[in-house]
Each structure stands twice: as structure tokens, then as C-alpha cells.
Amino acid sequence: MIIMKTSSNSNTYPLVSVDWLNNHLNDPEILVFDASMDKINSDANASGILQIPNTQFFDIKNVFSDTSAPFPSTVPSEEILTKEAQKLGVNSDSKIIVYDDKGIYSSARVWYLFRAFGFNNIAVLDGGLPKWKAANYPLETKSSQTKPNGNFVAHYDSENFKFFHDIQKSSKNKHHLIIDARSENRFKGIEPEPRKGLRSGLIPNSVNIPFSNLLVDGQCFKSKEEIQKEFDAVNTNNEHLVFSCGSGITACVLALGAELIGKSDVSVYDGSWTEYGSLTTE
């Protein structure tokens, strides 16, 4: 295993520190993925030209998504996940560490995606590339890394994701709680959506925990006690938690936060507000 076991259903603790990764970077079973994504309203290629050594790029948007779907970052099929993960050298006994260039942002999506497809031996680098740089650990110029094809075969568990028809039911289910990871101003419709043409609004009966509320300076997770307070504030005690955001990326940060405090009865709304706001008028 990567590190210590959790008290929940996960086989590994879902976070590793930059110190831990630096000490294990050359372990033969370790695979390091850079899952950086540009935000919808940011400059393209904002992530720069440097990476952690021996990193492979994990392309959420163009490879590890159903690119034929009408909405961004839609969960891929078992066949796509299997084929593309094997290309990156993922074996059934691999140990994956995933990071992004913002600290904690899109890396959590990769953690959640692999978990949904039956691969549990994966952890997110807490603090990501900014924390790695701050520790003065080695970097290299980005390049294409190649690995021998792996043998991992994906097995999709549909309980991990919800879609439009599911959300219509969840919003009326007293035992489900939809938690939106967008900023408070976007959730309230005070600030417009960054995606052009997408209306403002919220899913009926949903509540708000901005994903940034779980982080210190957007980079590292807060303590379990502080994360617990955020969830307690919206009364998540006995409900099935459904996480949403703009397009299914930062909803996974909430899912990771829930994992850290032992909440396992969760799912992610894959299309999130981009889908819901497009398919509804109120």
C-alpha cells in the first residue's frame, strides 16, 4: 500500500505530502500523474513548463473523458479508461500519486475517477506543484514520458456518479443532500458563470460548501477538525451526499474532503451546473 489505511472503505490514505513523494519518487511501482487543467476563465497554458520528475500528463479534458458528450469532462467508458490507463503504464498493483499545478484542484478528479473504476491505490499530492516548488524539490522540463503498457482493467461502479435524471430525484429526496462546490457568489447568482452563455442559479434544495473552504490558501487540505466543521455547518449527518460544482471537477475536492473525515456515502454529479443550468430554466 502507499501509506496507512483509512478507517473508511479506502485501501489507502488519500493524501501524501511532498516530503513523502520526494522520498519515494524513484520507487519502481510509483506512477506520478500531472492532472493540471486550466480554469475556464484563466489564460491557456498557465501551468508553465516544469514538472515533478518522471511525471506523465493525465489529460482529463481530452483523453480521460467522453469527448463525444455534450458537456465537459464527462465520465469515460470502462473501455476508454482501461485503454488510456494502460497506455500510462497502470498495472493492477501500481501506486499512483496525482498532482496539479494549483495545489488542490483537478487532481481530486483523477483520484475520484480511479476509485469509481475500481482502483483504490491512488493518492493526491497535498499542496501539489506549488508545495513541491516551495520545498525546493527537483523539477524537470515537461516532456512525454513513456511506460510499458499496464494490465489494469477498469470496472465501473455507477453508484459513484449521478446524472441529470438522478439529480432531479435527489433534489426531492429528504435523505439526499446536494452540496455545491462553487464559490458562494456563483452559488447565489451574484457572480456570473465563467462559461459563456451559461445561466446563473443553483440546483433546488442544494447547499453550498465552496471547495476553497476546505483548503489553506487553495493548496493544502485543512485539518480534519476544520473540514468536519464545514460539513457540520450544512447538516450532513445522515444523508447521502451528492457533490456538484461547475463541471464535475471541484466537486471531487469535496468528495476527497468527505473521505478524509470518514464519510463514504457520497456521489458526484458528473455534469454539475454546466449540465443542470443548460437543461433547465429555473
Image (cartoon, grey):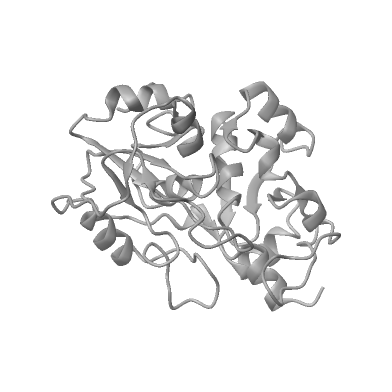
Residue 5 seen in this snapshot: no
Taking the view exactly as shown, the residue that stands out farthest to the left is 148
Q: Is residue 131 left or right of residue 199?
A: left
Query: Quick one: quadrant of the N terminus?
Result: top left
Residue 168 seen in this snapshot: yes
Q: Between 42 and 187, which is closer to the camera in this rendering? A: 42
Q: Position of residue 153 (x, y in %)?
A: 24, 54
Query: Quick one: quadrant of the C terminus?
Result: bottom right
Q: Is residue 100 left or right of residue 58?
A: right
Q: Between 252 and 53, which is closer to the camera in this rendering? A: 53
| For residue 265, above or below residue 22 | below
| For residue 33, above or below residue 28 | below
Q: Position of residue 280 (x, y in %)?
A: 74, 76
Q: Using the rendered view, name the quadrant where residue 199 is placed.
A: bottom right
Q: Is residue 90 left or right of residue 149?
A: right
| For residue 46, above or below residue 239 | below
Q: Between 137 and 247, which is closer to the camera in this rendering? A: 137
Q: Between 96 and 57, which is closer to the camera in this rendering? A: 57
Q: Position of residue 215 (x, y in %)?
A: 64, 34
Residue at (48% x, 24% y) in the render = 7
Residue at (73% x, 65% y) in the render = 193
